[in-house]
Image (cartoon, grey):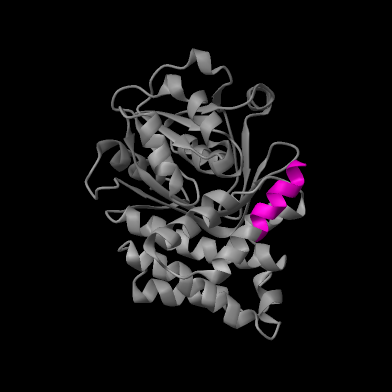
Amino acid sequence: MRLLVLGAGAVGGYFGGRLVEAGADVTFLVREARARLLAEHGLTIESALGGARLAAKAVFDPRTLAPFDLVILTCKAYDLDEALETIAGAVGPGTGVLPLLNGLAHLDRIASRFPQAHVFGGVARISATLDEGGVVRHFGELNRIDFGARDGGTDARLAELHAAFAQTPVEARLSSEIEQELWDKFVFLATFAGITSLMRASIGTVLETPAGEALILRLLAECESVARVERHAPQTETFVALRAELMRRGSPLKSSMLRDIERGGRTEGEHILGDMLARAHRAGVEAPVLEIAATHVRAYEIARAV
């Protein structure tokens, strides 16, 4: 099976690199400077689970692409439209597309752009970064990826992908309920990103304030209500785990959305908070805290564009 990974940064570089480590036929589609770096120095992963320096195939000119069996997308949501045009040559009739993006809105956009393709669901859970030297640095031990057909069916490409990951440190799970997995992360992320971005503080700091816990729980309840209306409410055990993560006293965790704000960058605010709010409005769910959080990030985006 021929795989194309769009990007060789923190997520694409880590998971794609582990597949290379397992002997999979992987090509990275990257910018020209990154392609030169990979050609000269290889793909380097530093991780407590085992480092690697790998010879990685990379291309930078999308005009040279021919259809692949599976394309893995690891871009930010605000780069999705550009990314879809970039991979167009790699997507032929029956090509599988596995996006590892936050939220849900991207799935219909990908399916609309490539009606001939099979769009799968994927959830990546990892803390990693690409340093200035081009090294993929993995923090901690969490390096999990869940993927599956959105209708719950089987697919030979996903089975082969799962078998390849089984030869690596990656905790990979082939899920028959990937839509629920996507919703579970969506509910958590909208709450986590919403509250930390709104308060410009970590979860632990928010919890130190008199009303912090109540506001977090109110926002979580709003997002869970949207999921329930759409028949994807988290199961009790999952919801308890999500709540516990958001209630961890002293937690230094900040959402990537807040980190984007702190560095003055673009955010996935519309893709996460805006989409969840639009779903709340369509479902008739009252979501005042979510609306404030979404408005806060929208105002930030307007101000940075001036």
Answer left or right for 151 relative to 197.
Answer: left
Q: Is residue 297 magenta?
A: yes
Image height check: is 108 above or below 139? above
> What residue do we see at 34% from left, 71% from top?
235
Which quadrant of the view contains residue 119? top left
Q: Position of residue 293 (x, y in %)?
A: 61, 63
> What residue do we see at 33% from left, 53% from top?
178
Q: Is residue 187 visible?
A: yes
Q: Position of residue 7 (x, y in %)?
A: 56, 33
Answer left or right for 12 relative to 167.
Answer: right
Q: Is residue 245 magenta?
A: no
> What residue do we see at 67% from left, 65% from top?
198
Q: Position of residue 271 (x, y in %)?
A: 53, 49
Tell me the quadrant of the picture where the N terminus can be found: top left
> What residue do we see at 46% from left, 38% from top?
19
Tell me the quadrant of the picture where the C terminus can be found: top right
Image height check: is 248 above or below 89? below
Q: Position of residue 169 (x, y in %)?
A: 48, 51
Asked whether 263 or 51 is in front, the reply is: 263
Q: Is residue 242 visible?
A: no
Asked whether 8 or 57 is in front, the reply is: 8
Asked whether 251 or 19 is in front, the reply is: 251
Which quadrant of the view contains residue 236? bottom left
Image height check: is 152 above or below 223? above
Q: Which residues are magenta?
A: 296-306
